[in-house]
């Protein structure tokens, strides 16, 4: 079975604070893909990053960074110097196997206050 | 390139009514998916298709039917609407053969069953 757990239901920070969103996954497959999506108040899903199971390199994109650790089955997402526009629900997701069956976590609602 | 389009954007159904949610993609993707997102929750896979003429059940298929007669279209049918089907429905597509694995989402259809 595969499962994604986002233990933080809601996080509230003040603008310019750093914030880390946790994601823990479970899968028996050796080949899998992890994703982060952003869902702003408007409701659409915005792709942020994809990482495959063979690539544990951390990634940085502007104020966003991702830490992938297979040893702890975690794929955490950090926003540095948060901004009000970062307020959204963030989903971590996992794909395994050839059918591309994507499983989502329950999401973390991030509120950034000015 | 419109990406993934969904119609309608909003719909209110009475219990027992039927309707079809439309989904079209113009990216020539082989895989297509239907998800539902209940309030405060992540997305759950209803059905998916790996190509024209091929469909398979996801995590929560009961109460729904799909068909895939063309690469572009993947309609979702609700035969006897129930209040439990009140949700936001997202269609997505992806191109597995290119190794991309990213799923491109439509804007969603908000369905209320009363």
Image: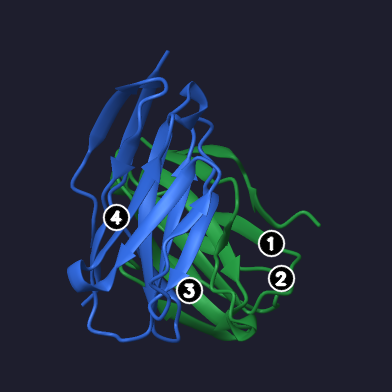
Chain colours: A blue, B green
Q: Picture coordinates of residue A10 (x, y %)?
A: 25, 33
User: Disc 2 vs disc 1: Cβ atoms closer than 8 Å?
Assistant: yes
Q: Are marks 4 and 2 on the same chain?
A: no
Q: Are marks 1 and 3 on the same chain?
A: yes
Residue at image coords 64%, 79%: B30
Residue linked to disc 2: B72
Q: Picture coordinates of residue A36 (x, y %)?
A: 43, 55
> Is B20 on the left-hand or right-hand side of B26?
left
> Is B52 on the left-hand or right-hand side of A5?
right
Residue linked to disc 4: A105
Report the quarter where the N terminus of chain A lies.
bottom left
Give the letter of the chain under mark 4. Answer: A
Label 4 environment density (alpha carbons within 10 Å; few <14, some 14–19, many ≥20) = many
Marks 3 and 2 sit apart, C-alpha to C-alpha, by 13 Å
Q: Earlier in the sequence, mark 2 or mark 1?
A: 1
User: Disc 4 vs disc 3: Cβ atoms closer than 8 Å?
Assistant: no
Nearer to us of marks 4 and 3 is 4
Q: Could one spot residue B14 in this view of the protein? A: no
Residue linked to disc 3: B48
- The disc at residue B24 is 1
Marks 2 and 1 sit apart, C-alpha to C-alpha, by 5 Å
Residue at image coords 59%, 71%: B94
User: Judging from the image, what secondary structure is the residue with disc 4 in?
Assistant: loop
Label 2 environment density (alpha carbons within 10 Å; few <14, some 14–19, many ≥20) = many
Report the quarter where the C terminus of chain A lies.
top left
Give the letter of the chain under mark 3. Answer: B
Marks 4 and 3 sit apart, C-alpha to C-alpha, by 19 Å
């Amino acid at each position: 079975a595969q499962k994604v757990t986002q233990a933080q239901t809601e996080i509230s920070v003040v603008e310019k604070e750093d914030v880390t969103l946790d994601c823990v996954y479970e899968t028996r497959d050796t080949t899998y893909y992890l994703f982060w999506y952003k869902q702003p108040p408007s409701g659409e899903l915005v792709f942020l990053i994809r990482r495959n199971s063979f690539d544990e390199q951390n990634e940085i994109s502007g104020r966003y960074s991702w830490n992938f650790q297979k040893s702890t089955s975690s794929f955490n997402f950090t926003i540095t110097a948060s901004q009000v526009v970062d307020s959204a629900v963030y989903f971590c997701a996992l794909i395994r196997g050839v059918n591309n069956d994507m499983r989502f976590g329950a999401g973390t609602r991030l509120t950034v206050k000015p | 390139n419109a990406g993934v389009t969904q119609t309608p954007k909003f719909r209110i159904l009475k219990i027992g009514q039927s309707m079809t949610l439309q989904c079209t993609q113009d990216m020539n993707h082989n895989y297509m998916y239907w998800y539902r997102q209940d309030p405060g929750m992540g997305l759950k896979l209803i059905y998916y298709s790996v190509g024209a003429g091929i469909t398979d059940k996801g995590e929560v298929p009961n109460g729904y039917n799909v068909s895939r007669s063309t690469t572009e279209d993947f309609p979702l049918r609700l035969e006897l609407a129930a209040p439990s089907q009140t949700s936001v429905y997202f269609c997505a597509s992806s191109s597995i053969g290119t190794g991309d694995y990213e799923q491109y989402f439509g804007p969603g259809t908000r369905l209320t069953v009363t």
